[in-house]
Image (cartoon, helix red, strand yellow):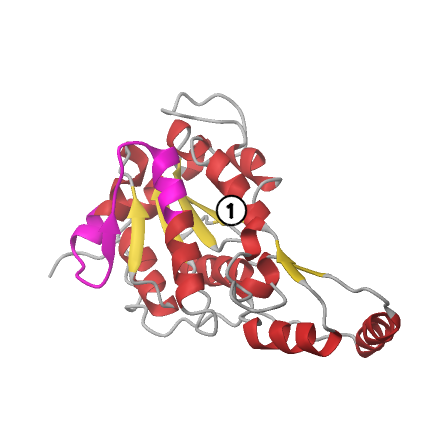
Amino acid sequence: MTQRIGGDVVVETLRALGADTVFGLPGQHALGLFEALRRTDDLRVISSRVENNLAFAADGHARARLAADPDGPVPVTPMIVSTGPGALLTLASLQESRAASVPVLGISSQIPVAGLGGGRHGYLHELRDQQASFRDVVKSVHVVRTVSQIPTALREAWESASTAPYGPVWVEIPQDILLAPTELPRITSVTAQPAPLTPVPELLTEAADLLGAARNPVILAGGGALRSGAHAELQALAEALRAPVLSTFGGKGVFGWDHELS
């Protein structure tokens, strides 16, 4: 039986969380992940020639699944890249994912644990603080230091990405952790539970009062209405108010084009 490594724990956890497709581009530090992906039939791997295209493809995959099933589970889409230049090339797409609330789970390798924390240790693609490049772009950053931390870090990242408003998250796992042999049991039952957003009654009442007193209301429907699957609710509100409905670019499709109020 092949010895399981940290990369296998990543793959098992992603599958347990509900992933069926991973976008990935190999790099030296991330080979532990791709060795684990090679050994599994549970995840479809889609690659690309360069990391920025890979990241935009992952973004598009998540958007397409959101549009196809707005009432289903949040389609968090994992994306795997390597350290340094590979990771940094995803920033443009991650910023777009953040602006449009697209749930992408970015997983990057890192230099070995011994090289983390600053300084110049001579590792390939070493950055003093790789996290810093992502911290103000994504919703949250999660860092792993041992194999046993992998399931929890991925679960927390998945919950962050799938909590409204959705958005991209970032997980860093050092090269030696991905390659480290492990005796952890096979991961099969990790579940993410994004926090529900409960409305504030006073704000709902105020909104209803404002709408009720409006003389010429117009509705501008955005991406949030589309992602939340509020098609029927939006139509009912528009018809009750007799309010014309426009949509932002991200909200297109949430209101029927052939409706008299469109």
Q: In which quarter of the image is residue 242?
A: bottom right
Asked whether 9 or 80 is in front, the reply is 80
**Coordinates of residue 28 in the picture (x, y in percent):** 27, 33
Query: What amino acid is labelled 1 in the image?
Result: Ser
In this rendering, position of residue 7 left or right of residue 133: left
**Coordinates of residue 82 in the picture (x, y in percent):** 35, 36
In this rendering, position of residue 236 left or right of residue 5: right
Location of the N terminus (image quadrant): bottom left
**Mark 1 Cα-neighbour bin, 10 Å: few <14, some 14–19, many ≥20:** many
- The answer to whether 45 is drawn above or below residue 229 in the figure is above
Q: Which residue sits at x=42%, y=51%?
A: 146
Q: In which quarter of the image is residue 211?
A: bottom right
Q: Which residue sits at x=35%, y=61%?
A: 14
In this rendering, position of residue 155 left or right of residue 47: right
**Coordinates of residue 253 in the picture (x, y in percent):** 50, 61
Location of the C terminus (image quadrant): bottom right
Q: Which residue sits at x=53%, y=24%?
A: 119
Asked whether 259 or 176 is in front, the reply is 259
**Coordinates of residue 243 in the picture (x, y in percent):** 72, 68
Start and end of the magenta stretch?
35-58
Q: Name the residue under label 1.
A: 97
Q: Residue furthest front?
A: 260
Residue 220 shows in the view: yes
Q: Total label count?
A: 1
User: Dot 1 lies on which element?
Assistant: helix
